[in-house]
Image (cartoon, rainbow, N blue to C red):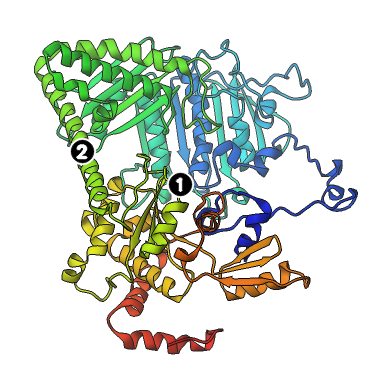
Amino acid sequence: MERDDLFSRLHDSGPAAEPAGGRARRPRPALKAGGGQGLAGDYSAADIEVLEGLEPVRRRPGMYIGGTDEKGLHHLFAEVIDNAMDEAIGGHASWIEVELEDGGFVSVNDNGRGIPVDAHPKFPKKSALEVIMTTLHAGGKFASRVYETSGGLHGVGVSVVNALSEKLEVEVARERMLWRQDFSRGEPLGPLKKVGEVHNRRGTRVRFRPDPQIFGEAVRFDPERLFRMTRSKAYLFGGVEMRWSCAPALLPAKGDVPAKAEFHFPGGLQDHLGDLLKGERLVGPEIFAGRAGRQGAHGSVDWALAWFPGEGFVRSYCNTVPTPEGGTHEAGLRAALLRGFKTYGELVGNRRAAIVTSDDILTSCGAMLSVFMREPEFVGQTKDRLATAEAARVVENAVRDAFDHWLAAAPAQAAELLDWVVERAEERLRRRRERDVARKAATRKLRLPGKLADCTSTSREDTELFIVEGDSAGGSAKQARARAIQAVLPLRGKILNVASAGRDKLAQNQQLADLVQALGCGTGARYREADLRYGKIIIMTDADVDGAHIASLLITFFYREMPELIRGGHLYLAVPPLFRLAQGPKVLYARNEAHRAELMAREFNGRGKVEVSRFKGLGEMPMQQLKDTTMDPAKRVLLRVEIIEDDAAETKLMVTRLMGNKPEERFAFIQERAAFAEVELDV
């Protein structure tokens, strides 16, 4: 295993990044002296690849659609329907049709202007349609002459869909003439064809089937997801009618997905939020909704907000493109609401409003926000987060004035809403005080010789708690730790085996009580992830049988009493050395006897005696050695403890069998596996 070389590299390579999940980083091979041969000789100009056309998309699809999972698959549909929506927002299309077929095809049809089919000036032998479908960064949305606002920005979207589709068909109706061109995996299957004259039809129809070579043989669209995406577009722009149809064979047995439907919501986001909160009791009977600017024009903003007793949510959009990770437009909304509440609190003399934060306002608020911006900036090709700085100012100015008037127009509702938000703020402060009291109480109670030595950082994510065995190891660990982020809690001797002890013994055990109080998150049904005081809980025991036993007891305790702490990725095992090997200035560390033998054979020559010393325990290690081998985040190895959910029942049975109060079960386990033991067991 690569991890076997960890200690041999500590003094030769210097600090290295901490391996994730307990895996050691592969060492870099050294370049051979003299050049010509070795790594440099194997790397030439012939190894430099130049990807052309749509080949980069097929080689690295995750760069363009975020991955080849279900989210990436449905992003293909989003790219196509966003193009149709751009035509509708620009006033060129009044309806969009979406059809999901039994054969895996999905089609999007609009009655817009249609993709241009004449020859492209830069590529006279190709139509503009073929250029758009087969060339990255080709489109009509780089400037604002064709579209004032649009979801497309880089001329990438539909060409990416083409590259990742097994088959794609485009039909364009322009000037009473129907044109068609077919593609497969980004390549045209023939030239653009003139199908014939058509009447009462215009616009673009894109029909495609995702490529199973990219998404897997079981690739298929989720009808419910496509239905929601289609319906949401009608909410976001009241000037378009969305038409949905789905093959009956694809309809889920349970669900609200119809075979055919038409959507047109002049009320926009207010209608959408009303549907989402149907049946909920609102704090104040009205939804705060409004619009600033001409819908679809640059700088226009639509919003709808309502407060209710459930868990809040914010769904935001820019140019009808969903932004699930938020961005600057959401920051503007937060600023407008916070200033509005505080100003109204000062107006009515409610001093408690001063403690309110934007999180208090939105924690139980359902919010819908849509903004239209010319040439918006997104984070990444999948456009999950808006980065346009101007959006924050536009949204804040639009919502702030409207919110002030809304509160002033209904004093009774405004007072009820303000009290509701203040209660959320007071609840937040109360919980913070409880955590602070618990933290101070734990520190005060355990600040004794050999007890908890806390860290100075107040950020949970960066802090670590080392659980060590005994005062001697605790003293060494306290000297070796990084005081800002590392805390040390020594435990005396072997802790209680919670798998075989009753609840009364568990409640009376002082060591476990100290540990629970230091962690601050509670146990069992009272466990709260938010109250955990440290980001990493590290069990650091001696590298011998006794140390392994103590670690097993601690893991059993966390598995039985705090399984969510393990599932949250907070529990780790340190990997301290058992041997120190020295030959002159060369010093290496070995974790166990097998590792020692390997290092002796591989790292030391026959010149001079190799001094081998065995650590009696962590308490016997000099502070600097303990820091370099076990505690320094830049050099150490941590093994993360995980619960494999697929084997949860087997894991529970094994813990009961090995750690329970029936010794015959353990003896039977040893007998069953005795043939696989490679060392002599002391049983």
Q: Nearer the viewer, residue 631 or 228?
A: 631
Q: CA distance from mark 2 to mark 1?
A: 27 Å
- Crowding around mark 1 (Cα neighbors within 10 Å: few <14, some 14 to 19, many 20+) is some
Residue 320: numbered disc:
none
Q: Nearer the viewer, residue 567 or 70?
A: 567
Asked whether, in this view, residue 406 is left or right of residue 330, the answer is left
Of circles 2 and 1, the one toward us is: 1
Read off the residue under disc 2. 433
Asked whether, in this view, residue 606 is left or right of residue 179, the answer is right
Residue type at the position of mark 1: Ala
Sequence-wise first label, 2 or 1: 2
* Residue lying at 77% horizontally and 53% vertically, measured from the top left: 30
Among the 4 quarters of the image, the one containing residue 52: top right
Q: Position of residue 537 (x, y in %)?
A: 38, 55
Residue type at the position of mark 2: Arg
Q: Say if 668 sits above or below 360 in the image.
A: below
Q: Is residue 192 visible to us here? A: yes
Read off the residue under disc 1. 482
* Residue lying at 38% horizontally and 18% vertically, measured from the top left: 239
* Residue lying at 35% horizontally and 74% vertically, measured from the top left: 655
Among the 4 quarters of the image, the one containing residue 401: top left
* Residue lying at 77% horizontally and 70% vertically, measured from the top left: 605
Quarter in which the C terminus is drawn = bottom left
Q: Secondary structure at mark 2?
A: helix
- Crowding around mark 2 (Cα neighbors within 10 Å: few <14, some 14 to 19, many 20+) is few
Q: Position of residue 208 (x, y in %)?
A: 57, 39
Q: Position of residue 151 (x, y in %)?
A: 50, 24
Q: Position of residue 658 (x, y in %)?
A: 36, 79
Q: Say if 596 sits above or below 378 in the image.
A: below
